[in-house]
Image (spheres, helix red, strand yellow):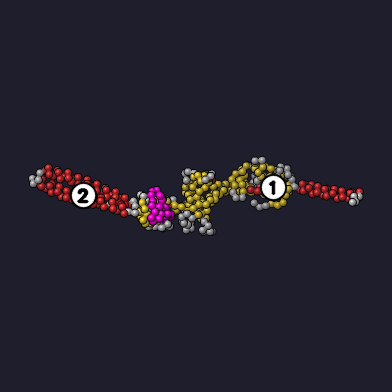
Amino acid sequence: MKFPSLIQKIIIASILLAGALGAFAVWKFGAAEGVLVNVVTVEQGPVSVFLTATGKVASGHEVKLTARTAGQVVAVLVKEGQRVAAGQALARLDDREAKALIGKPEASLRVAQADLAQAVRQVEQLRQWVPAGIEPRQKLEDAEAQLKTVEARRGLAQAELHLAQVALEKLNVVAPYAGLITLSPVRVGQWVMPPEALFILADLGQREIEVKVDANDSAGITVGQEVAVSSDAFPGQPWSEKVMRLAPSVEKEEAANTVNVYMSLSKAAPALRFGQQVDVKIRTAFSPKVIKVPFGALINKDGKTWVAVIEQGRARLLPVVTGIEDLTHTEILQGIKAGQQVILAEGKTLNEGDRVRVAARKPQ
């Protein structure tokens, strides 16, 4: 084994030294040149904040219809999706017992009416005979008393018949108003009992959009606000509606607190069905003329928000106070002015005093 000669050692050392000096020169030159950055001009203009959510077509007047008494369903007279008129029969329960029970008060009423007719004739006759001395006054008084008794008996028979008729009517489920049957889970042969829902009836004249939003976001929503609406079923056909009302209370859904927001469904809307999904966009905040910068200009450091400007080739960090933000920009309430040049940090780590150089200016 041969060991390198002195000359070879000197050559190797020279090569290593040259490499180290070259690396140092590259580092020194880079440091002297600084970090390559882009800059953008701080502008003044509008910022809008929008809340997007998914809703559905609903009815402002919708009721669950139940049977008024327990019984077995013998007929379902309408189908889901069918329009019905006010007072229209929707289903019928077994009414054989009720029809049998109605016969007795009907017979009692017929007898009472016949007895009443006879009592009236007798009183009228006696009222003619008593003044003529043909019959004594006592007989007339007795007949008049009998007439009152018969009238009372007829009234009782009428009341009993009415109760029996009501019991029979309770075996029919009818629509309280005109509308659309949106749900009909009832089936023939089913035993039902109040308050079990047999139908859901929606008023066609009170269609609206129902949206659930996070309770924290609801503070920016007010009655009368315009809402941009669209539906995947009708692509390319957006339209506008307005907020009509907000639910007065918060609903608890799993870990979230939500508020129901109800919006109009005007004639401008396409032919949507009840329950159909729509997408809404609500502007919850708006400032017409604010100082704003792109998101990429913000630097989060030491629990504060900063922007960086260039002074004599070095980065200078300025603390800022931010306001509302839209999809691309953030409002700056304090710290910089319109027209200033700020660095688009875009995730780069910048420290106070870092040497920087501008690569290009990006449009906002």
Place of residue 146 in the rendered image (x, y in percent of width and height, measured from the top left): 17, 45
Along the viewing direction, whichever of 9 and 28 lies nearer the viewer: 9
Q: Is residue 36 left or right of residue 248?
A: right
Asked which quadrant contains residue 83, the reply is: bottom left
Determine which residue is flagged by label 1: 348
Place of residue 195 in the rendered image (x, y in percent of width and height, measured from the top left): 39, 48
- Residue at figure coordinates x 31%, y 52% from the top left: 97
**The residue positioned farthest toward the right in the image shown:** 6
Sequence-first tag of 2 and 1: 2
Q: Callout 2: 10 Å neighbours few (<14), some, many (20+)?
A: many
Do the numbered discs 2 and 1 sit on residues whose CB atoms are within 8 Å? no
Determine which residue is flagged by label 2: 112
- Residue at figure coordinates x 24%, y 46% from the top left: 156
Place of residue 110 in the rendered image (x, y in percent of width and height, measured from the top left): 22, 52
| Total numbered labels placed on residues in the image | 2
Marks 2, 1: nearer the viewer: 2
Disc 1 residue type (three-letter)? Lys
Along the viewing direction, whichever of 3 and 219 lies nearer the viewer: 3
Along the viewing direction, whichever of 341 and 320 lies nearer the viewer: 320
- Tell me the element at label 1: loop
- Tell me the element at label 2: helix
Q: Callout 1: 10 Å neighbours few (<14), some, many (20+)?
A: few
Q: Is residue 260 left or right of residue 128?
A: right
Q: Is residue 32 magenta?
A: no
Along the viewing direction, whichever of 320 and 121 lies nearer the viewer: 121
| Residue range of the region highlighted in magenta in the rendering | 178-203
Q: Is residue 126 left or right of residue 23?
A: left
Q: Is residue 218 left or right of residue 99?
A: right
Disc 2 residue type (three-letter)? Ala
Q: Is residue 192 magenta?
A: yes
- Residue at figure coordinates x 90%, y 51% from the top left: 2
